[in-house]
Image (cartoon, coloured by chain):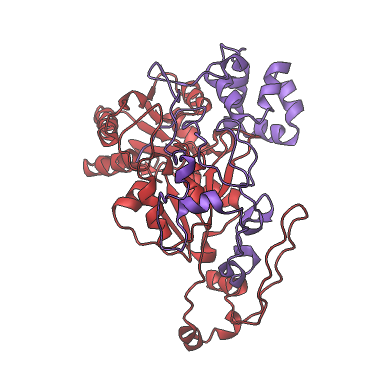
Chain colours: A purple, B red
Amino acid sequence: MSHALKSYMVKLASDVERLAAFIADPQRAAEEAGLNEKEREILFSKDPQRLYAAVAHPERDPDDQKQASPQIHGKPAGTGTQIWCYQPLPVKQQATPIVTVNYQEPVAAQMHSSPPIPVPISPTWWHQGPAAVPMIYGQPMAEAGPWPVHPVHPTYGQPVHGQPTHAQPVPVIGPWPIYPRW
Amino acid sequence: MFDEQLIVIGTGIRTIGQMTMESIAWIKRANKVLYIISDPVAEELIKTFNPEGAESLHPHYGEGKPRIQSYNEMIEKTLAYIREGKVVCFAAYGHPGVFAYPTHESVRRARAEGFKARMLPGVSAEDCLFADLNIDPAMAGCQTYEATDFLLNGRIFDPSSHVILWQIGVLGDLTFKPNGYDIKGMPELLQKLYSQYPPHHPVVIYEAALYPGVEPLIRQVPLFMLPNAGISPISTLYIPPAVPARTNWSLIQHLGIYSSYAAPVPAPPPPGASMQAPPPINTEPEKHFSTAAAADGAEV
């Protein structure tokens, strides 16, 4: 890899004419910018991890960095850490509530026993007209079940489909470091 | 005019397209550009336009170090350069004044010491959320909290409004952890949310896209699945309204705007072909809060 992709992205961020040309015809603009086939493939990959790897470490091949994490203070970030999540329950303890709420069925029991339930459309939204209904991918959010409607995230892996399962550890950090400021 | 000694700018969430021309101009103009940015494109842009003065503030973060300590060091460094007579540009990702302590505090202290300081707006994650989730905060009101603050300080929220919790991925942790956070306040957060929302209320984990052509992360889950929703440190939690607004019909009549509020509700959009059919909707005539009335109110 070279620095051409990174330089081109900097130019896109700072030159409105280039950005306009890119929006009008991305492939042609990238070709005219002198990006080679591999760089163009990464630019149009829609894969944030590959894009990050390509611009963060242009001297390396981003496809060789798939398992690598960004470096923060010389140390790899996001290696082997998992978010807090429900622990897998032994079969005999499936009904044990983890979080009990003011509803008839404890949450943990719901997670094990309940089939996916379409979310009813909140009367709030209808009272306020269709414009108030949150939309996801062009569909009213409440109609977009079963959860989740989002495709598999390239970084964070498989979402939980249909029947809830609760033993899926998820990597905690994305392809880039995050610096809180609050 | 344009004689600021401290200018605070935001690079947006997606640098390509969201960084303003004014911000770029100030990066070129400044003697010193201090930045908190994780996007290599934005960092390279700053180094390209101001190779002499670019300086990262990342080294002030430390594993397990209280973030407030890091922020105070950043503020001190900023003010030190200003006192030397340099024009300082403080660049932060997103909007520099939204959920950003060191930027606000730098401006406040610089002004207190008699220096001219200004903050320029940028595109925040919340701005991206409104666009990507297609919600208008004016429609039901919007409450925005930092997740840990929401939990610790007894914030009272309205389930008839949009609720947005920032930094859900660092919930309950006031330090910096480059290898990720354990989100140890999650059970307590769920308990608090269950006081107003049913467990199956849909919520959305949202992460804005950082690069052109990349789709934002929009993951809808029921509330009780939140701990398993793949929360990362850059995640924002969006909770849609769950109950109707508490409309004061007496006041509406008193104000003489009843006819606008009683306007018929527009027909609901047809369900998607590939989606499940929605449950039957009660179409009995009611006195609805109409979008037309909201628009009228906004114009007034």
Judge by depth and name the residue closer to the eye, B299 or A152.
A152
Looking at the image, which residue sits at the far front? A92
Q: Position of residue B146 (x, y in %)?
A: 38, 48
User: Looking at the picture, how far across and down is residue A31, in whole percent?
Assistant: 74, 21
Q: Nearer the viewer, residue B82 or B294?
A: B294
**Image point 52% across, 60% down: which residue?**
B137
The quadrant holding residue B103 is top left
Residue A66, position as x, y percentages in the image = 58, 19
Residue in front for this viewpoint, A71 or B115: A71
| Image position of A23 (left or right of B70) | right
Above or below: residue B275 compared with residue B46: below
In the picture, measured across the screen, residue B7 lies left or right of residue B237, that is: left
Classify residue B56 as left or right of residue A128: left
Q: Nearer the viewer, residue B51 or B297?
A: B297
Position of B19 relative to B269 (above/below): above
Looking at the rendered image, the quarter that the C terminus of chain A falls into is top left
Say whether residue A1 is visible.
Answer: yes
What residue do we see at 64% from left, 80% from top?
B263
**Vertical comparison of A12 with B107: above or below:** above
The number of discs equals 0
Q: Is residue B124 visible?
A: no
The residue at the far left in this view is B113
Identify the residue at image location x=62%, y=12%: A1
